[in-house]
Amino acid sequence: MPHRALVVTLALLAVTAALWLLHVFGRTLPTGALVAAWLAMTAAMGFALFRRARIRRAAALGAYLREGSALRHRFRGGWLMASTRLALGAALALALLLAVLRLDDGRAWAALVASAPVLGAAVLWLQQRLAAHANAVYLPELAWRLAAAAVGVVLVAVLVALAFHRAYPALGDATLEQAVWHMADAERARSAFAQALLQAAAAKDGLTLWLAQQLMPEPGASLADALGWLVVLGEETLFVWSYLTLCSAWLLPITYSEADARTAS
Amino acid sequence: MRELRLDCTWPDALAAAFAAVITGVLLWLVTNVAPRDWPAPPVMPVTVDGEHYRVGPAELEWLESFSELHFTAGEQAAREIVAAEIDARLDAIFADARARVPQFADWYYSLRGEYTRLAMAALSFAHLAEPDYVARHAAAILFPDDAWESGLAALQGAAGAALAAHQERVRSGWLAEVTRRLSDRRVPPPLPGAATDAPVDLDRLLQDLAARERAAFTTRVSVSTVAAAGAAAAGSAAARAARTGRLAARGAGRGAARVGAAAAGGATVCAPSGPGAVACALVAGAAVWLGTDWALLSLDEHFNRDELVAALEGSLEELRAQVALALEESYDRLIAERYGAARREIRKEFVPAEAGARVGH
């Protein structure tokens, strides 16, 4: 299915390109445009999370309940599942929006761009390879989870490595107030809403950096050092998770349509 | 089981090439195109009292105009303070002088005073003594023991201290208002080693002003010749008062009368004395001369003392007004010079601020 692979690749590249455009012009956009972008991302991610949750639920119900049981329909996932996934999607969309606006490292963007065709090819390849073994209802989700896990781990490793080699401001001689204020003050945006969010994120970075440089002035193998990098790892994981969730939303019409049709019945 | 087809057809190759081109273009874009920054608002760093502030163009304009107005009002208040200090100190100095006017009148209408004046006039005529003996003696009586110099020095010291204290109040009031107004614009100090814009350093401005004014108000002002002459001027005024009007005519009349009375008195008393008549005439004539002089002086004092005292007091009042005016002019020049320097310092310090204001508008 090379044309399908092309569509998937182009779809994922479109997601990455859209995020990059948001990065390039996001600070000059008015609040309305940013809120619209956030709502669109929330809708897409919430919808994708909901659909995938229903597929997982259908697979679980198929394992525990008899064919034709009314409970299958009752527990297939309704408003409660939709609302929790929408809330999760809103939080992930906000985290992704902020991360995208603040991701100034061109190498990180290159990694995201490079991951798009790899991810699309991996999903399709896994779908074909696992078709003979996996439950047809669960196949798209299984293929996606395996592909996303593999690509996600590599992406997180790349982003953490880039963070490790990045230059950070020296805050060893600064007070906590100085560190937080000056980090937050460097963030500018046309939208007051966006600027407040960016400054909050920058203040968090200032706090983390200040604590890191106060607690572990010299890089070493201490527990504090490990905890500091765990924070970086957590941030990058959240970013990659939200990015892949948005990508999965774009893949829904292409790779999940058959499974959706089956779970909806 | 569906298999991934790896055999490459033309459409497949074209699709792959298209995806590769799109990916390549996107890679180039993300690594070469910088994000659009939103410009920071035009703000100027300001340091006051060791604290750091960031203020916008409107607040900078307010800060500049408020500083000018505040120091201008301080200048006006400084003039009023100096005028009050000059009035109070000169009142005390001239009250003492007025209290000594009767003492000068007593001396003036005494025989000793009369003959001292005559003797000093004769010596002065023969270039054996300084002229203006009356003026110098009047100065010695009205302002004894360098009372004028010490009084003037005390006045300048008190005025300098009052001006310095006032200036301190002006500065602290300015600082309190600026700090209150900018309190919500306070920011932490710059990061150590970070390159920052040169701030509007109001601490430096305050230090410069304080240094200038300490030097200015603790040194004595250069007063005019009227004020510096002081006691001498007062003596000259007293001498002029004594010489004016009928006083001088009375003095000339006394000279003619005493000569005639002495001659007549000596001839009358010593006519029967025989060989001792000449000596007798001299003694009798001298006695009559002195008596006549004393009587004329008493008569002169009776009719003219009040006029002399009034003339002397008037002269002192006139002198006081001249001295007060001279001192106020001297201090006005000093205050105008110092506060003008303060305003120039303010404008100089706010030049970057004006540039910031232009950017903001």
Image (cartoon, grey):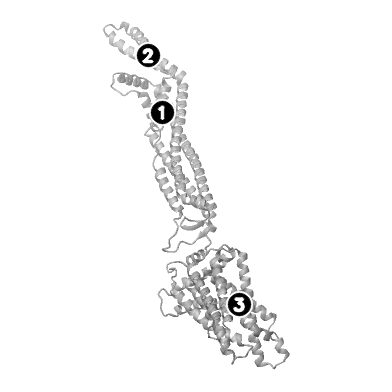
Mark carried by residue B234: 1
Q: Where is residue B317? Give x, y as percent.
A: 47, 29
Residue B224 seen from this side = yes
Residue at the spot 41% in from the left edge and 78% down from the top edge: A220
Q: Nearer the viewer, residue A87 or B222?
A: A87
- Identify the residue at the far left of this view: B275
Tell me which label, 1 or 2, sits earlier in the chain.
1
Q: Quadrant of the N terminus of chain A?
A: bottom right
- Identify the residue at the far front of this view: B10
> Which residue type carries mark 2?
Gly
Pointer 2 residue? B255
> Which residue type carries mark 1?
Ala
Q: Is residue A30 left or right of residue B231?
A: right
Eye-nearest disc, 1 or 3? 3
Q: Nearer the viewer, residue A112 or B295?
A: A112
| Distance from Cα at disc 1 to Cα at disc 3 | 106 Å
Pointer 3 residue? A250
Labels 1 and 3 within one chain: no
